[in-house]
Image (cartoon, helix red, strand yellow):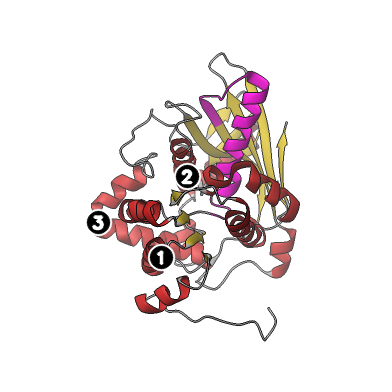
Amino acid sequence: APGETPLVVADAGDEASLAAMVSRTKAVLTTVGPYQLYGSALVAACAAAGTDYLDLCGEPAWMRHMIDAHQATAQRTGARIVFSCGFDSIPFELGVWFVQEAARQKLGGPVPRVKGRVRGMKGGFSGGTAASLKATMAAAARDPSIIALLKNPFSLVPGFEGPEQPSGAKPLFEEDLGSWSAPFVMAAINTRNVHRSNALLGQSYAADFVYDEMMLTGPGDQGQQIAEAIAGGAGGLGGEGGPKPGEGPSKEERETGFYDVLFVGIAADGQRVMASVKGDKDPGYGSTSKMIAESAICLVTEAGEVPGGIWTPGAAMQGKLVARLEANAGLKFTVE
């Protein structure tokens, strides 16, 4: 940014400074995580002031605590609190919305089963993502109730228990796709956001909606070996050797990264509809920075009808956000 860009200084631990900041703006876009360590007071300030809030959070237990604490206040003040406006979970949460729209057009209605499958991805994880995972594990060690939230696929839908969901924890061969698939590291947050979207949209996908995410690793023995290797090493992100806060992929890695996610919608009678979401940059930085910026602009300038409350980006902005992401953020939503 230019050197003369004006700055507003606020401290995540100083509630008065946060209140002063949020009173000056229509929306706050925050990347100051782990949110469970540094974000709670800001959510409270925005909810109280009626100021819109957007973040990159992938911490489901903290998100549930914020829903319980601030949903009623945000509804009263008109604040739109929108979590997970980056790679977790826009391509997945909005991808499911998009494939359901395609199902309505092609099959005459939504489908009760969607599979999200990462076909390709290149990029690096940030130290902030690793720090969030470590903070979540530490919190779970202190408070066993957090473990129950982390295990519940409907943890972001208070008072609702849907059907049993696939675990996504073991490699499997998918006959319909001709490929092995492995556990996907972001599934634990993305699946929760998808189910919250379904609830916010009045269970418009189905009350018994089933969704899971995996990463495709290819056919044959090689595909199986890759899938088993991923399944055996999925915990490395939170280890001591991972990136530190402030560290992340290089500029070249950000520019040459990409992702390609397939969504397979399956109707009760077996008919299928498929769609994909693709991004043109490293998912965690290059694409995420554009997704959260476009989400904020869309919320403030094009989504005035959305009432106060705690939202997912897809449920709040739907096709308006798809259009902005395609026009300005390097994403492509395609029916296949």
Dot 2 or dot 3: first in sequence order is 3
- Amino acid type shown at disc 1: Ala
The residue under label 3 is: 143
Direction bottom: furthest residue: 4
Mark 1 or 2, closer to the camera: 1
Left or right, 159 with reference to 290: left
Q: Nearer the viewer, residue 111 or 116?
A: 111
Residue density around tag 2, few if under 14, some if 14–19, many if 20 or more, within 10 Å: many
The stretch of residues the image draws in magenta is 85-114
> Dot 1, how many residues are within 10 Å of its Cα: few (below 14), some (14-19), or many (20+)?
some
Residue farthest to the top, as pictured = 269
Tell whether 143 sits left or right of 331: left
- The residue wearing badge 1 is 49
**What element does badge 3 sit on?**
loop
Q: Main secondary structure of the magenta part?
A: helix
The residue under label 3 is which amino acid type? Asp
Tell me residue 198's x, y (percent): 47, 36
Quadrant of the rendering where the N terminus is positioned: bottom right
Residue 110 percent coordinates (x, y)? 56, 25
- Residue tagged by mark 2? 193
